[in-house]
Amino acid sequence: MKRIILSTAIIFCSLSLFAQIPEDAIKYSWQPTNGTARIAAVGGAMGSLGGDISATFVNPAGLGFYKTSDFVLSPGLSFLKNKSDFRGTKGSDKDKWFNLGTSGIVSGWGDAGQWTSKAISLAVTRSANFSNRIYYTGKNDFSSFAEQYAADAAKSGHDIGNLFTFSDVSLGTRMANVLYVIDTATLPGHTSPDVISTAMYNQLKKGGAFLLDQSHLIETSGGITEIALGFAFNRKDKFYVGGSFGIPIVKYNKHSVLTERDATGSTNNYFNFVTLDDNFTTTGAGINAKLGIIAKPVEYLRLGFAIHTPTWYSLTDSYEGVMSADLENFRSTPAVYTSDSKEFTNGAPSKYKYELVTPWKFLVSGSYVLREIEDVTKQKGFITADIEYATYPSNRFKNAEDYDDNGLYDAVNSAVKDYYKGAFNFRLGGEVKFTTLMARLGFSYYGDPYKDKELKGNKMYLSGGLGYRHAGMYIDLTYVHSLQKDVDFPYRLSDKANTFATLKPSGGNIMLTLGFKI
């Protein structure tokens, strides 16, 4: 029942907003820490360690360990394999892309005042990478994706004969209306016509059976590139405080092809196939802040605490789609007919502006450093761990257009609150140092953000790497292997439980960091 109530809110509100559904909120905030190769090798655990430019995006107090200046560059290559299971049918797909770890300039200098030293950084990182390819297919005797448009049409109260002329129904509903993918019919036990899915009704009426072959291809690209200015203060090498201001820049592209075909074997049930091929783009930018402290109560021990404010995004969605349908002899001239969403938007992609506020994050961390002395050549390594809590239900959409439209977002935000829960993330790593060479291992786990026990989601990363430091130069090489679980809903319905694919992405990230003392 929970998912039926949730999808009702989404169907009757977010259809009009093009794409604002719970998954659109979580994709900006359920992301692993992306640092330099050194930090990636120790699982991203950076909350109390310090001495790395990655601190700008995790706990800026760690910049306070710098007393000289570094230039850092961290290119990487990622590859991913997606395993899927949709209604009992398993599949897989692959993709690869360029990645950018934390890069930039950090500078520290001594101070004759109450602060032993100060530091400042200008850094950039790819805080989210949306490059992915997912494909799944399976047989469905339970639902049709056209049912969402039938529900939208029925709720509108408009005459289905000219439904496509009304802007308060979704573009998908209008395309489905033009192509007779939805229509009216008087069902048994009803006294007046209902809006129904043509595929479902005609199959049952003509053949007595309902069975579809459904497939969904999703190709995404882009990411969030965040530029941040960080600063920190060091008091007597015992207490460090810092902050940073970030500007994340969003570019997200999604190409989706959702198809359902007649799987009954009949050639006379007025349905062959329907396909929705659409393209969706989000662009925009935001602002956020991070504050943190690190304390060294005794030698060998470092304790850290940081707060990440929500990111306040201003975003613009652009959408265009083409629906194609072959209804066999349902129409007087059998053929494959198409409808383009731009027919209803004056020949241009539809656009919509809105705001998104992401969750708060709270971080506590501890590090044990072997031989904690100022001469780094005599330090033998460290063990470090982070515990992070993210308030995923606090994701919020807001209207950014000239007219008051927040009533629509109230239902979507309520759905987000019901859909997600707060989750803990854990990061653990260590380094052993052999004079100029270092070996590192790490592990991180990002907890399940979904409330519904049927929806399983988590991300786990295993990492290892090597480092070399000599004569003002350092080179780090890391491999991170990912094991993930997630879900994908091809469509959402208002009157029955929703079908979804379970996803198990796995893959790796190879990262190289080059650093120079300047």
Image: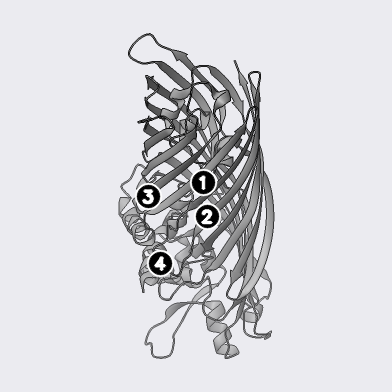
Dot 1, crowdedness within 10 Å: few (<14), some or many (≥20)?
Answer: some
Q: State which tag comes first along the sequence, 2 or 3.
A: 3
Q: Which residue is mark 2?
A: 459
Q: Answer with left or right where residue 454 lies relative to residue 462.
A: left
Q: Earlier in the sequence, mark 3 or mark 1?
A: 1
Name the residue: 38% across, 48% down.
389
* Amino acid found under the numbered disc labelled 3: Asn
Pick the residue in front: 348 or 293: 293
Residue under the image location 60 percent in, 90 percent down: 207
Q: Which residue is mark 1?
A: 32
Q: Nearer the viewer, mark 3 or mark 4?
A: 4
What kind of element bears circle 2?
strand
Q: Nearer the viewer, mark 2 or mark 3?
A: 2
Q: Earlier in the sequence, mark 1 or mark 4?
A: 1
The type of residue carrying mark 1 is: Pro
The answer to whether mark 1 and mark 2 are in CB contact below 8 A is: yes
Quadrant in the picture for residue 244: top left
User: Are the residues at dot 1 and dot 4 in contact (C-beta closer than 8 Å)?
Assistant: no
Residue 262 position, x and y percent, is 64, 79
Please give the label number shown on residue 452: 4
